[in-house]
C-alpha cells in the first residue's frame, strides 16, 4: 500500500484538507464545486458541515470518506494521504479507517440487522464466530441487540439508522462520516440518533464529521463549519 | 438472488427450458448419429424404381455368390398391427431370414432364445420396449395383421414370443429397442409364396469394398426386368427422408438459436436486477469491497442461477422423455424411435452451458458495476 509517511504535526488532526478543489466539466463549461478548501479536524472532534444545497458539503464529505477524489489538493485522513492511493488501496483503506452513515441508511434488505452490521467485517481475516460477536457488540452499543435477527423492513426508520451506525462503527474506524444522518427521521428518532452519535464521540473518542441542514443536529457538534459556493464562510 | 424470488425463479426456469431443449435435441442428434453410423459392413439392396416394389427371391443366391459378400438375408417391413382399427397400436416389425441375426450383432439375444426362435417358424423376438409397452413375455402369443395389402391373409398371423433381445447403447448407440422380428418363411408360405423381397441385407467382409460390391450387385441385374439399387446401410437410413444430414444441422441450429435468445433474455433480466441493486453495490464499495469482488459476486450469482436452471432442465428432460410415449398423438410419433436417454456427456455439457449462460448474461452488468463510481451510484438511487 502506497501510504504517505505520517507527519508528526498531523498526528493531532484526524482529518486535514489542504487547498482542495473540485471542478466538473459540463457542456464545455467548468463548474467549481469546491474552491481551495482548507480544513483541519482534530482527533476526537465532532464537526458539523452546514450550508445550502449545492454548496459542496457532501462533496467535501466524500473526499474525507475516500469515495471521491478532488481535482487538486491533498486529503489526509488518519495519517494517510488518500489522494495518493489507487482504487484498490483506497477500498482497503476505507474498510479499516472510515465508517460511513448515509442519509437513507442503505441497509441491505435481504440481510438481517446482525448480517448488515457484520458486512464490513467480511473483509477482515476474522472467524465467523468473532464476526458475529463483534456485530452483536456493535448492536448493543446502539441499543438494538434484541433486534439482531430482524430484517430492515421490520425496523422503524430510527432503528434502521441505528443499525447503520452499528455497521459504521463495527470495524472500529478512526473517523466516522455522516451525510444527513437525521434527514429522513422524525424528531424523536433524530434525537435518539444524535444522542448516540454524541455518545460515540464523547465515550469512545470517535472523530465525527457530519453534514447536516438541521441546526438542532449541528448544535450537538463541537464545531460548525458553513460552506457556501465552495468556500468556508468563517475561514 | 433472494431479493426477488419471482424474477430469480423465472430466470432460472428460462435457463431450464433452454438446457432442456439443448439436452433433448443433442440426445436426439447423438442417437441419430449413432444410428446412421451403424452397419458399416452392411449393404441394402432394394428395387431400383421404388422401395414399395419387391425383388425376386431368385436374386439371393446370385448376390451371395459375389466375391466379398459374406451373407445375404431377406428382410421385409411387415407393417403389422394387433388391431388395424387402432392407429395407436403401431410398432415396427420385420419378416427376416435366419442369416439376418448374425449380421446384426446389436440385437443381443441369449443363445437359448435364439435356438427357440430358429426352431419355431411361428416364433418371434421382440425388443424390451415392446415387452414393457404391451406387457409381453417369452411364451406369450401375439396376432398381427399387416397394413400392407400384399401381406394380408385370411386371418391374422399367429406368433409365439421366443425371446426378448437386449441393446447395448454404448457399443451400438441408437439401436432400436422396440422392434419385432419373425420368420420371412412364415410370411412367404402364409401368402402363397408371392410376397417377394422388399430388401436384401448384404453383409460384406471389407467395408472398404462397399462401393465395388454395391456396383457389382446392381450390375448383376442391370439387364433384367427388375433392376436393383444397392447402397450402404448408412446411406439407406439417411435417405429415409427424415435422417438427412440437414436435419442434424437444423437441430443444432435450433439449439443455438434458443440458447442465444435465452442469453439475451437472461442478460436483460440480470441488467435490471443489477440496476435495482445500485444502492447495495454503492454500500458494498463504500464499505471497502473492491470493484473486482463486486463484479465476482454478480458473475457468481449468474453462474449459480445458470447451474440451478440447468439442473432443473435436466430433471425436466428426464421426466418428459419418460412421459412422452404415454402422451396421446405425441406418443404414437415417438414410439417408433429408439428410446432416448440423455448420455452423461451431454448432461455434463448441459450443466456447463447453463453455468456459462448465466455468467455470460451477467458479464455486462458486472462490468458496469465494476466501473461505476460510488458517488454516481448514490446519486442515481
Image (cartoon, coloured by chain):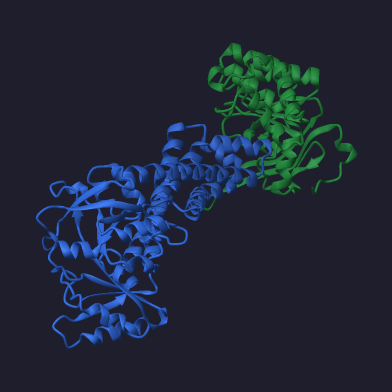
How many marks can you see? 0
The foreground one among B187 and B350 is B187
Using residue B75 as the reference point, say whether residue A220 is left or right of it: right
**Residue B242 % position (x, y):** 27, 63
Using residue A100 as the reference point, say whether residue B336 is left or right of it: left
Using residue B351 as the reference point, say whether residue B127 is left or right of it: left
Q: Is residue A221 visible?
A: no
Q: Residue furthest front?
A: B119
Question: Residue placed at 13% from the left, 69% from the top?
Answer: B194
Quadrant of the drawing holding the C terminus of chain A: top right
Q: Residue furthest left?
A: B154
The foreground one among B340 and B73 is B73
Relative to B229, residue A2 above or below:
above
The foreground one among B224 and A229 is B224
**Residue A103 % position (x, y):** 59, 26
Q: Colour of chain B?
A: blue
Relative to A101, residue A90 above or below:
below
Q: Quadrant of residue A228?
A: top right
Using residue A183 as the reference point, say whether residue B113 is left or right of it: left
**Residue A123 % position (x, y):** 71, 37
Relative to A37, residue B370 above or below:
below
Question: Residue placed at 32% from the left, 58% from the top?
Answer: B117
Q: Quadrant of residue A198?
A: top right
**Residue B13 % position (x, y):** 42, 40
Q: Quadrant of residue A35?
A: top right
Relative to B297, residue B194 above or below:
below
Q: Which chain is green?
A: A
Amino acid at each position: 500500500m502506497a501510504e504517505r509517511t505520517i507527519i508528526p504535526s498531523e498526528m493531532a488532526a484526524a482529518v486535514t484538507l489542504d487547498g482542495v478543489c473540485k471542478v466538473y466539466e459540463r457542456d464545455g463549461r467548468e463548474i467549481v464545486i469546491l474552491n481551495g478548501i482548507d480544513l483541519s479536524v482534530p482527533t476526537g472532534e465532532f464537526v458539523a458541515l452546514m450550508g445550502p444545497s449545492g454548496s459542496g458539503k457532501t462533496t467535501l464529505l466524500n473526499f474525507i470518506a475516500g469515495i471521491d477524489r478532488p481535482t487538486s489538493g491533498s486529503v489526509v485522513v488518519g495519517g494517510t494521504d488518500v489522494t495518493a492511493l489507487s482504487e484498490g488501496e483506497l477500498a482497503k483503506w476505507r474498510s479499516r479507517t472510515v465508517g460511513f452513515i448515509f442519509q437513507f441508511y442503505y441497509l441491505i434488505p435481504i440481510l438481517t440487522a446482525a448480517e448488515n452490521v457484520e458486512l464490513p467485517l467480511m473483509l477482515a481475516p476474522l472467524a465467523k464466530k468473532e464476526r458475529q460477536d463483534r456485530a452483536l457488540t456493535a448492536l448493543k452499543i446502539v441499543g438494538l441487540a434484541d433486534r439482531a435477527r430482524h430484517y430492515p423492513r421490520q425496523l422503524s426508520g430510527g432503528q434502521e439508522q441505528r443499525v447503520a451506525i452499528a455497521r459504521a462503527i463495527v470495524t472500529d474506524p478512526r473517523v466516522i462520516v455522516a451525510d444527513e444522518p437525521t434527514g429522513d427521521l422524525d424528531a424523536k428518532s433524530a434525537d435518539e440518533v444524535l444522542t448516540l452519535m454524541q455518545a460515540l464521540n464523547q465515550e469512545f473518542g470517535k472523530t465525527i464529521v457530519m453534514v447536516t441542514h438541521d441546526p438542532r443536529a449541528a448544535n450537538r457538534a463541537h464545531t460548525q463549519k458553513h460552506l457556501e459556493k465552495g468556500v468556508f464562510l468563517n475561514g | 438472488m433472494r431479493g426477488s424470488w419471482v424474477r430469480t425463479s423465472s430466470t432460472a426456469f428460462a435457463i431450464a427450458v433452454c438446457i432442456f431443449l439443448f439436452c433433448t435435441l443433442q440426445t436426439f442428434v447423438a442417437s441419430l448419429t449413432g444410428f446412421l453410423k451403424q452397419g458399416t459392413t452392411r449393404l441394402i439392396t432394394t428395387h431400383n424404381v421404388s422401395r414399395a416394389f419387391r425383388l425376386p427371391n431368385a436374386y439371393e443366391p446370385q448376390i451371395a455368390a459375389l466375391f466379398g459378400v459374406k451373407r445375404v438375408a431377406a428382410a421385409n417391413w411387415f407393417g403389422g398391427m394387433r388391431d388395424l382399427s387402432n392407429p395407436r397400436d403401431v410398432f415396427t416389425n420385420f419378416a427376416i431370414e435366419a442369416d439376418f441375426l448374425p449380421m446384426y450383432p446389436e440385437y443381443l439375444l441369449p443363445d437359448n432364445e435364439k435356438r427357440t426362435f430358429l426352431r419355431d417358424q411361428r416364433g418371434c423376438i421382440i425388443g424390451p420396449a415392446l415387452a414393457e409397452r404391451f406387457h409381453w413375455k417369452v411364451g406369450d402369443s401375439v396376432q398381427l395383421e399387416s397394413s400392407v395389402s400384399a401381406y394380408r391373409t385370411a386371418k391374422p398371423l399367429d406368433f409365439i414370443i421366443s425371446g426378448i433381445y437386449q441393446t447395448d447403447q454404448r457399443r451400438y448407440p441408437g439401436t432400436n429397442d422396440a422392434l419385432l422380428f419373425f420368420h420371412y418363411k412364415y410370411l412367404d408360405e402364409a401368402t402363397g409364396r408371392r410376397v417377394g423381397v422388399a430388401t436384401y441385407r448384404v453383409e460384406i467382409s471389407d467395408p472398404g469394398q462397399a462401393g465395388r460390391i454395391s456396383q457389382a450387385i446392381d450390375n448383376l441385374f442391370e439387364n433384367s426386368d427388375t433392376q436393383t439399387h444397392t447402397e450402404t446401410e448408412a446411406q439407406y437410413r439417411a435417405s429415409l427422408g427424415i435422417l438427412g444430414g440437414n436435419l442434424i444441422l437444423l437441430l443444432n441450429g435450433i439449439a443455438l438459436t434458443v440458447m442465444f435468445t435465452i442469453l439475451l433474455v437472461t442478460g436483460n433480466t440480470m441488467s435490471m436486477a443489477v440496476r435495482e441493486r445500485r444502492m447495495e453495490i454503492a454500500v458494498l464499495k463504500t464499505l471497502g469491497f473492491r470493484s473486482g469482488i463486486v463484479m465476482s459476486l454478480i458473475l457468481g450469482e449468474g453462474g449459480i442461477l445458470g447451474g440451478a436452471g440447468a439442473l432443473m432442465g435436466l430433471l425436466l428432460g428426464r421426466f418428459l422423455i419418460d412421459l412422452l410415449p404415454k402422451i396421446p398423438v405425441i406418443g404414437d410419433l415417438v414410439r417408433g424411435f429408439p428410446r432416448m436417454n440423455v448420455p452423461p456427456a451431454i448432461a455434463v455439457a448441459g450443466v456447463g452451458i447453463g453455468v456459462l449462460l448465466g455468467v455470460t448474461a451477467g458479464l455486462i452488468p458486472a462490468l458496469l458495476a465494476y466501473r461505476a463510481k460510488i458517488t454516481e451510484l448514490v446519486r442515481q438511487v
